[in-house]
Image (cartoon, helix red, strand yellow):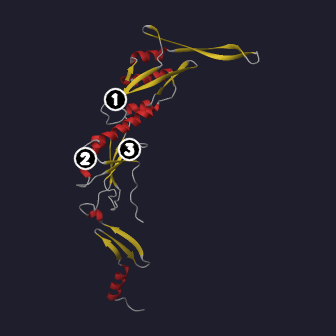
């Protein structure tokens, strides 16, 4: 067995040193000997600036959207924004394809409609029956959004509403056969009292609430008041009227507002494109 020489040690180091195949600014693809396993060494994070911008900026109103796009878009270029009505988002792709020049599509500004806390609560309890005391407590929490009837009167009525059920036979006859018919029907009698004695239960009531963050003004929303007998307590609730339509109209108003602004992006109807994939 021969002694290991300094030359042998140097040769061994050379054999174990990664051999670069391709490389660019701040990175290299190397082959690790033996076995030639390929590994990418990326040192670009050490550079003072990234080679390209990427990521998503999310905003909640039209002025912020326009300001973010104007700040980040390349000078002398027109940005395309994709209006997705189903998702209620408007997304400007700052590195989109331009003519026959492909883009990465990984740098975006998105206007997203985020519901306010109050609107979220009204939506969450829509069509959900509540026990009488629970419903009255909910109205107290949301009183500042109720515009008709007077919140205090509505709350008092919800606490004092009472229902009684009775059954009776309804008689009739079949004109075809001449036979008499009868059926058992259930009758619910509802009464409500307030400070001024007996009051009429409203068929509908109105709330005024900002639907989304960034809305300058509240939106008037009508709701159908619902009730049914439920043992010792009445079961009370409501159904918001045209809630989905109102949200859609608010999104369309935002798209129109952005499109009518100076230097606005080009609006395209549809979901945003996926990022460009390598392969």
Mark closer to the chain start, 3 or 1? 3
Q: Nearer the viewer, residue 213 or 19?
A: 213
In what element is the residue under mark 1?
loop
Q: Are marks 3 and 1 in contact (CB under 8 Å)?
A: no
Mark closer to the chain start, 2 or 1? 1
Q: Nearer the viewer, residue 4 or 147?
A: 147
In what element is the residue under mark 2?
loop
Mark closer to the chain start, 3 or 2? 3
Q: Are marks 2 and 1 in contact (CB under 8 Å)?
A: no
Does residue 28 sit above or below 203 in this rendering? Answer: below
Label 2 crowd (10 A; few <14 / some 14-19 / many >=20): few
The image quadrant where one finds the C terminus is bottom left
Does residue 2 sit above or below 22 in this rendering? Answer: below
Q: Relative to residue 90, is residue 189 drawn left or right? A: right
Kindly report the distance in space between the C-alpha atoms of the residues bearing marks 2 and 1: 28 Å
Which residue in the rendered view is the most extreme toward the front?
176
Kindly report the distance in space between the C-alpha atoms of the residues bearing marks 3 and 2: 19 Å
**Percent x, y of residue 35:** 44, 78
Instruction: Report which residue position mark 2 lands on.
Output: 263
Query: What residue is drawn where x is 39% and y is 76%?
Result: 31
In the picture, residue 104 is in which quadrant? Answer: bottom left
Q: Relative to residue 49, is residue 33 drawn left or right? A: right
The image's mark for residue 218 is 1
Query: What residue is drawn where x is 25% and y is 49%?
Result: 70
Instruction: Report which residue position mark 3 lands on.
Output: 89
Label 1 crowd (10 A; few <14 / some 14-19 / many >=20): few
Query: What residue is drawn where x is 30% and y is 39%?
Result: 257
**Percent x, y of residue 233:** 54, 19
């Amino acid at each position: 067995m021969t002694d290991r020489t300094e030359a042998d040690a140097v040769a061994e180091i050379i054999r174990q040193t990664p051999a670069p195949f391709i490389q660019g600014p701040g990175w290299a693809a190397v082959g690790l000997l033996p076995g030639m396993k390929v590994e990418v060494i990326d040192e670009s994070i050490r550079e003072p600036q990234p080679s390209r911008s990427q990521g998503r900026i999310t905003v909640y109103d039209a002025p912020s959207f326009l300001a973010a796009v104007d700040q980040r878009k390349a000078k002398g270029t027109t940005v395309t924004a994709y209006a997705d009505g189903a998702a209620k988002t408007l997304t400007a792709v700052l590195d989109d394809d331009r003519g026959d020049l492909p883009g990465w599509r990984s740098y975006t500004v998105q206007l997203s409609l985020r519901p306010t806390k109050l609107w979220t609560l009204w939506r969450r309890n829509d069509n959900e029956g509540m026990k009488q005391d629970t419903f009255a407590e909910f109205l107290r929490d949301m009183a500042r959004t109720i515009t008709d009837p007077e919140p205090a009167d509505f709350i008092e009525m919800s606490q004092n509403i009472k229902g009684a059920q009775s059954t009776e036979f309804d008689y009739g006859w079949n004109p075809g056969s001449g036979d008499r018919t009868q059926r058992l029907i259930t009758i619910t009698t509802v009464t409500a009292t307030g400070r001024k004695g007996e009051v009429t239960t409203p068929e509908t009531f109105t709330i005024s609430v900002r639907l989304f963050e960034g809305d300058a003004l509240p939106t008037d929303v009508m709701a159908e008041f619902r009730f049914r007998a439920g043992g010792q307590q009445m079961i009370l609730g409501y159904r918001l009227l045209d809630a989905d339509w109102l949200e859609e109209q608010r999104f369309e108003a935002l798209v129109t507002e952005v499109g009518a602004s100076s230097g606005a992006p080009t609006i395209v109807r549809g979901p945003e494109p996926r990022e460009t994939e390598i392969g």
